[in-house]
């Protein structure tokens, strides 16, 4: 705020005491005149002070909202607003009447147990529309909407609108699709220049960053339960045009809070396979005891940590420099695969190692190029 200079008022000093009445009259007149002359200055000062207080109030009011929500989200909009990259202005989340009137479905682009996903158009903008596939999964769908609303940020797909009565959700469309398409995308002629260890390791860093965010989210510590296989896990993430990741499918994101004794079980059926964490497996399988959900142990977010090495193995692929990445990550990946969940690192621990490996390899790569 600019500093306002204030006028300096100088007061004359009258020497001597006493004097004639005419002198007293003249002094009174001069005093009265001085008061009249100072009155506009005082008024200006008070007006400036009032204006500065108003400006300070407006500034503070813009910084701190009554509900303590941040003024803007990552896209520069107010909370509960959206703005796609090609849009100039922010728009409030679309509600039922606007979705029914202005969103036009174009084609089916994906389908799962919970919902069908369509490519759609809204006022010239490409969007994704998710519709509930079966009423049997309505709770999963509603949970996904609530999580998407609560977790909006740069690591989460942007919510455009929703209509709960029609079980419809609208999100930003990412034409490169899910992370399952990574190798296909990088094999395309105009994308081959991106197929480097830098791009792939940065995607791995994005993946760990998302886990860290979910494990420390504004909605509590959340576990990615819809990740019982590598393919299912990869399908939860979308690849953006600038080759970063956003998490997209939040239908199965239960909360963990050890202090409240709140743990999770990812579904009420038996889970199998090497991809899932040991604590997710039926402990009495070798004893021939049939599966019972009541006897199944609960667990926490460390199940996500167990899966990190397998996801990273896919992300790095067979790119030049990949072997060196795996070498540097060997120890932290070994810790991720600890049979005891308590011995596994946190997502933040893994993230710091990943970033250090990227930084060191980038620096060494630069030094090697300088020598050439």
Image: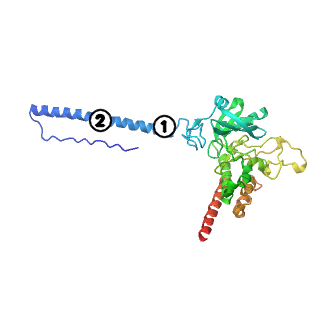
Q: Does any portion of residue 305 appear in the rendered image? A: no
Residue 348 position in % (x across, y down):
65, 53
Q: Quadrant of residue 170?
A: top right
Q: Position of residue 325 (x, y in %)?
A: 69, 62
What percent of the width, then of the height, locates residue 172? Answer: 65, 41
Label 1: which residue?
Answer: 61
Instruction: Find residue 187 and name its label.
Output: none
Q: Is 30 above or below relative to 365?
A: above
Q: Which residue is mark 2?
A: 42
User: Which element type, helix, strand or loop, lies under badge 2?
Assistant: helix
Q: Is residue 127 above or below residue 347?
A: above
Figure quadrant of the N terminus: top left
**Structural crowding at the residue carrying mark 1, measured as other residues with C-alpha within 10 Å and reported as few (<14), some (14–19) or many (≥20):** few
The secondary structure type at the circle numbered 1 is helix
Q: Which residue is at the front of the view, 257 or 71?
A: 71
Using the numbered discs, state the Cα–Cα distance from disc 2 to disc 1 in whole angstroms: 28 Å
């Amino acid at each position: 705020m600019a500093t306002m200079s204030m006028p300096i008022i100088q007061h004359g000093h009258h020497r001597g005491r006493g004097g004639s009445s005419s002198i007293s009259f003249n002094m009174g007149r001069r005093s009265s005149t001085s008061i009249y002359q100072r009155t506009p200055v005082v008024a200006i000062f008070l007006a400036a002070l009032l204006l500065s207080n108003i400006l300070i109030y407006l500034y503070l009011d813009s910084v701190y909202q009554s509900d303590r929500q941040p003024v803007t989200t990552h896209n520069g909009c107010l909370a509960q607003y959206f703005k796609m990259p090609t849009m100039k202005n922010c728009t409030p989340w679309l509600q039922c009447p606007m979705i029914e009137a202005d969103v036009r479905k174009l084609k089916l682009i994906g389908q799962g147990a919970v919902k069908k996903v369509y490519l759609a158009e809204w006022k010239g903008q490409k969007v994704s529309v998710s519709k509930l596939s079966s009423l049997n999964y309505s709770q999963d769908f509603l949970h996904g909407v609530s999580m998407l609303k609560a977790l909006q940020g740069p690591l989460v797909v942007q919510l455009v609108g929703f209509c709960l009565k029609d079980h419809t959700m609208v999100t930003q469309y990412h034409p490169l699709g899910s992370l399952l398409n990574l190798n296909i995308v990088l094999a395309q002629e105009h994308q081959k220049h991106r197929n480097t260890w830098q791009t792939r390791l940065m995607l791995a860093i994005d993946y760990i960053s998302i886990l860290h965010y979910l494990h420390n989210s504004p909605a509590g510590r959340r576990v990615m339960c819809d990740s019982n296989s590598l393919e299912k896990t990869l399908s939860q993430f979308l690849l953006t045009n600038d080759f970063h990741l956003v998490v997209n499918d939040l239908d199965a994101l239960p909360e963990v809070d050890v202090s409240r004794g709140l743990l999770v079980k990812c579904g009420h059926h038996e889970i199998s396979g090497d991809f899932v964490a040991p604590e997710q497996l039926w402990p009495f399988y070798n004893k021939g005891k049939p599966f019972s959900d009541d006897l199944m142990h609960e667990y926490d977010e460390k199940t996500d940590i167990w899966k990190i090495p397998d996801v990273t193995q896919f992300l790095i692929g067979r790119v030049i420099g990949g072997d060196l990445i795996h070498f540097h990550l060997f120890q932290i990946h070994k810790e991720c695969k600890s049979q005891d969940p308590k011995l596994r690192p946190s997502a933040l621990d893994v993230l710091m190692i990943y970033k250090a490996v990227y930084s060191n390899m980038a620096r060494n790569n630069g030094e090697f190029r300088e020598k050439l």
